[in-house]
Image: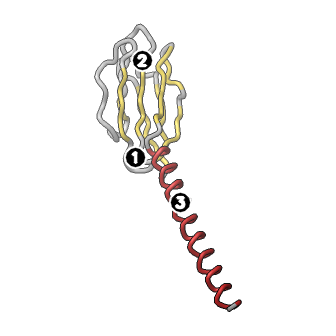
């Protein structure tokens, strides 16, 4: 009898552990989802991209917002993403980054304005 009871306890415990593992897995999955929908924002202010270099993960989005009174554009040096139209004040431009690598970009209106997106795996 003692052996049977012990076995039942072990079975119940295994069940509980399995359930806990599943719950943890679900939580981890949700956290991963949150990370992949994270918004990476770059402000354009005083003729500069802020931050000038940003590190993001492949599949994430990057959004620029123009806080200047001047129009600015975002153009990929290596054509890694479509170029923006001229952004007016408070206008935004969003891309989804693809393959890992370094994406250099500049403003075609003011070519001295440059920035870099580092795309990690
Ligand atoms: Cu500009």
In the rendered image, which residue does mark 2 sit on?
66
Quarter where residue 72 is shown: top left
Please identify the residue farthest to the top as the structure is shown.
69
Please identify the residue farthest to the right as the structure is shown.
2
Q: Earlier in the sequence, mark 1 or mark 2?
A: 1
**Relative to 75, is 110 above or below?**
above
**Relative to 46, is 57 above or below?**
below
Query: Residue visible at 53% across and 29% down?
Result: 52
Label drawn at residue 23 = 3
Label drawn at residue 27 = none
Q: Quadrant of the N terminus?
A: bottom right
Quarter where residue 77 is shown: top left
Mark 2 closeness class: few <14, some 14–19, many ≥20 residues within 10 Å: many
Mark 1 to mark 3: distance in Å?
A: 26 Å
Query: Residue visible at 43% across and 40% down?
Result: 103
Q: How is the image coloured?
A: secondary structure
Q: Tell me the element at label 1.
A: loop
């Amino acid at each position: 009898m003692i052996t049977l009871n012990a076995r039942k306890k072990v079975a119940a415990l295994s069940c509980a552990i399995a359930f806990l593992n599943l719950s943890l897995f679900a939580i981890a999955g949700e956290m991963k989802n949150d990370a992949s929908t994270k918004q990476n924002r770059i402000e354009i202010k005083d003729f500069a991209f802020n931050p000038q270099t940003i590190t993001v993960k492949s599949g994430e989005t990057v959004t620029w917002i123009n806080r200047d009174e001047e129009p600015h554009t975002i153009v990929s040096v290596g054509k890694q993403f479509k170029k923006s139209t001229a952004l007016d004040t408070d206008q935004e431009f969003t891309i989804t980054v693809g393959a890992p690598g370094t994406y250099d970009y500049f403003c075609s209106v003011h070519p001295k304005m440059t920035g870099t997106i580092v795309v990690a795996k």
